[in-house]
Amino acid sequence: MADSKPRIERPLSPHLQIFRPLPNMVMSILHRITGAALYVGTLILAAWLIAGATSPDAFATVEWALGSFLGRLVLFGYTWALFHHMIGGVRHLIWDTGHGMGAIGREQLTWLTPIGSVALTLLVWIAAYVIR
């Protein structure tokens, strides 16, 4: 071991416990989670469509399941995930154009995602119950 190089002390990346979670970090994580939820929700939508094309009994069974309290709760979550993911995608599209990258614009666009997704979800479900 004639030519052993001295070990270079490099800075370590800070662990996640050191960081205070910023709103845009949380929205990024939620964007990924809602993407996965949309996958599951799309399978439910496909099951509903397949049941409708199969037989009246199969369609009635799926309608019963989705009409139950748990089914409506899942559909409500699917609606919220759809709007949250869509608004997050629009936010990233705005950022891709170079707009809203300042500290104030970034915070405003970030907070628009949860507020807008909850508002749109409630609006759709209220409209659905009024029309029904």
Image (cartoon, rainbow, N blue to C red):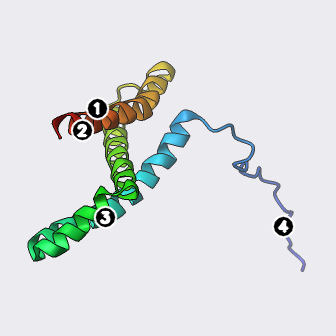
Measure the alpha-carbon separation of dots 3 and 1: 23 Å
Measure the alpha-carbon separation of dots 1 and 2: 10 Å
**Quarter assignment of residue 74:** bottom left
User: Mark 4 belongs to which amino acid?
Assistant: Lys
Mark 4 or mark 3: whose residue is earlier in sequence: 4
Residue wearing tag 2: 129
Is label 3 in a helix, a strand or a loop?
helix
Tell me the quadrant of the picture where the C terminus can be found: top left
Are discs 4 and 3 less than 8 Å apart at CB?
no
Are discs 1 and 4 less than 8 Å apart at CB?
no
Q: Position of residue 116 (x, y in %)?
A: 36, 31
Q: Position of residue 81 (x, y in %)?
A: 37, 48
* Mark in front: 3 vs 1: 3
User: Mark 2 belongs to which amino acid?
Assistant: Tyr
User: Mark 1 belongs to which amino acid?
Assistant: Leu
Q: Position of residue 86 (x, y in %)?
A: 31, 43
Residue wearing tag 3: 65
- Other residues around mark 4 within 10 Å, as few (<14) / some (14–19) / many (≥20): few
Task: Using the rendered image of the protein, determine whether residue 50 is visible from the camera's viewpoint.
Answer: no
Mark 1 or mark 2: whose residue is earlier in sequence: 1
Residue wearing tag 1: 123
Q: Is residue 57 above or below residue 113?
A: below
7 or 64: which is nearer to us? 64
Residue wearing tag 4: 5
* Mark in front: 1 vs 4: 1
Is label 1 in a helix, a strand or a loop?
helix
119 or 103: which is nearer to us? 119
Mark 2 or mark 3: whose residue is earlier in sequence: 3
- Other residues around mark 3 within 10 Å, as few (<14) / some (14–19) / many (≥20): few
Tell me the quadrant of the picture where the N terminus can be found: bottom right
Mark 3 or mark 1: whose residue is earlier in sequence: 3
